[in-house]
Image (cartoon, rainbow, N blue to C red):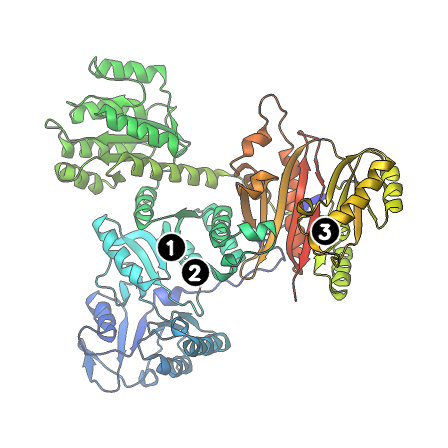
Amino acid sequence: MARSAANPAVQADGSGAQSRVRDLEPLFAPKSIAVIGASRTPGTVGSAIPSNLILGGYTGVVYPVNPKAKSIMGARCVPSISAIDDHVDLAVIILPAPAVEKAVLEAADHGTKHLVIISAGFKEVGEEGAQRERRIKAIADERGLSIIGPNCLGVINTAPDVRMNASFGRDMPRPGRIGLISQSGALCTALLDYAKGHHLGFSRFISFGNKCDVTEVDLLRCLASDRNTDIIMMYVEDISDGQAFVNAAYEITHGSNPKPILAIKTGRTPQGAAAAASHTGSMAGSDEVYDAIMTQAGVIRVESVEDLFDLAEIFSDPVMPAGRRTAIITNAGGPGIMATDACIRYGLQLSKFADYTIKSLKFQMPPTSSLKNPVDVIGDARHDRYRAALDAIAADENVDNIMVLVTPQSMTPDAEIGQVVGEAKGFCTKPIVACMMGAADVAEGVEKLHSYKVPTYPFPENAMRALAAKARFAEWTRTPHSRFVQYDADKAAVEKLLEEEFKAGRKQIVELKALEVFRHYGFSLVPYALAKTADEAVAAAAKIGYPVVMKISGPKILHKTDVGGVKLNLRDEASVRAAFDGMIASVKDKMGDDVEIWGVLIQKMLPPGKETILGMSRDERFGPLIMFGLGGIYTEALKDVSFRLAPIRENSAYVMVRSIRSYKLLEGVRGEPPSDVPAIADALCRLSQLVTEHPRIKELDINPLIVYPQGKGVVVADARIILSEK
């Protein structure tokens, strides 16, 4: 019997432990800053940071630390942080790498708890630098410090009561509602410039570099609690703690005040690059790991900087859609078709207008207009015609989103149309996006739209892709909080079995023992018995009942079918004896006479069902990664599988099943009944609990898990478990 966790927040990591939530506010709203390594030399980082702080209007006190200078930018220098006769909230360190450790200790001795280390020369340059970084991390842990960096651009807070640009970026970004965290400092400068050209501003801007102490998870939580941040953008090359990331991001995107997280993830982990022996491990590269953890956390992963800002623009409008039904208003047929294609391609739906909307449009539009969706207001449309179309469509209860498309014509007043769309956005309770196709000829219209904060795109595909992302996020926020399911399982019995196998030197658990593990966690199993001789096989078959299946059993035999190790539909004693002798001979012929064979497993021949596969591969960084897919060729050839990081919530199990490309086969085709998807989800949740509670399990496959029609359940037909070296 299953029971739900009493407190999902406490159970979020599967162990009941909660990760520490750090107070990083003094990092972003310090009343005083010491710039250790400030310089008077133009063009240096040591010169740029105090200049950015002072000229950018920082509201606190700046202390340039330089023993060889009297003043920098009119601010008096001090020889060391210890010479400052006041408390320092934040220390920004810009020194050669070998001198950084001493500066950190001096800052800690002075009582400063928050530091930003701009300096490079740490783990990114090799082992010597990595050792420096580890020593700084040890100091942070021992002294209770919070350190951003090293090897970073710095931090920015545009709030009017702070106005802190503690970075060496060229300009202070315009204030806005976007919080950005980036592992790459160089990318940060490009993002700042790109945002300026797209009329977007930032609340906080953090380059966190090597993240020797403060991680992306800490920064996500900080931005989540910031009242000036509505959207979180992030660029990461790796994630420090997968489960902590999932827990934090889930709370942010699905909490009482949900905020979208838009992420670019690049790079590959060594763990993902090294394919494991199991089905799961061989298919779980780093991209699959990151896709899995971001999907189950509600994070929107994007592929490019352009997509990142396209989505940031649409999420800057706080109005959320009630659904996916989308209306298109256009003054040209071809672009209207492009918009329609994009609408369907990205998972939106075309609205079907109510009768009263059609009547209103017919009354106000020319006879040549198309009144169906998309609404073509014809190429000579002026702003009044767009206003009439917007008024009618905005009032339609069958419309969730509106896209206004304008192509430049000689009679098209783009600025006036932009104003009409902006005014409509002011009263409309549905998201409105605009697409002004072109550049120079529609520049005034684009500026007018930006002045009204209407999300504006150059092409229909960009607009529809952004709308679709917003619609999916709105659906995510409306999904009820899903629980972690906890089953009554014999954890002690499994731990004892695994310990016995490990002590016996068996890392690969024989199928007989693997099935026993699953039995202790409540999986439905096919009746089975191990036979070491032909006589034992005949006796087991008679007890189980014909027809039966015979499968070879041995620690090195991973793919039984390839070596003749599986015989199906054995219906009598003679066929069992012949199969036993033939199987042993075939396996030895294929793998050598010295191959270790434990015997054969006799199982009840199951009635036909859908073959699926469940698996787990334990990533060294993230922990247990669970896999689901259809069995047979769908696993081997098509790699049609989905992944999630355990422990999984109940709804994640259902999403895993539905997200494979071949899910239609489980729904039932050509008169077949639908498969028992709830039973598959239940098996995934049981598997999640099993691998979370037993970290000794390194890899695992249930292949196949036979699925029967809805209400008839699932059965584990074959399985294997591999234990870790530790």
| Amino acid type at image mark 1 | Met
Residue found 15% across the figure and 33% down from its top:
414
User: Residue under circle 2?
Assistant: 216
Whether residues under marks 3 and 2 lie with C-beta atoms below 8 angstroms apart, the answer is no
**Which of the two residues, 12 or 408, is positioned nearer the viewer here?**
408
Q: Earlier in the sequence, mark 1 or mark 3?
A: 1
Calculate the distance from the C-alpha at mark 1 to the C-alpha at mark 3.
Answer: 55 Å
Q: Nearer the viewer, residue 573 or 134?
A: 573
Where residue 588 sits in the image (x, y, percent)? 74, 52
Of the numbered discs in the image, which one, if any, rests on residue 234? 1
Residue farthest to the left, as pictured: 410
Kind of element beneath mark 1: strand
Total labels drawn? 3
- Helix or strand or loop: what does disc 3 sit on? helix
Q: Are marks 1 and 2 in contact (CB under 8 Å)?
A: yes
Q: Position of residue 424 (x, y in %)?
A: 25, 31
Question: Is 153 left or right of 649, judged from the image as shown?
Answer: left
Q: Quadrant of residue 202?
A: bottom left
Residue identified by numbered label 3: 589
How far apart, in angstroms, are the residues tagged by discs 1 and 2?
A: 9 Å
Residue 259 shows up from this direction: no
Above or below 358: residue 209? below
Residue type (three-letter) at the residue carrying disc 2: Glu
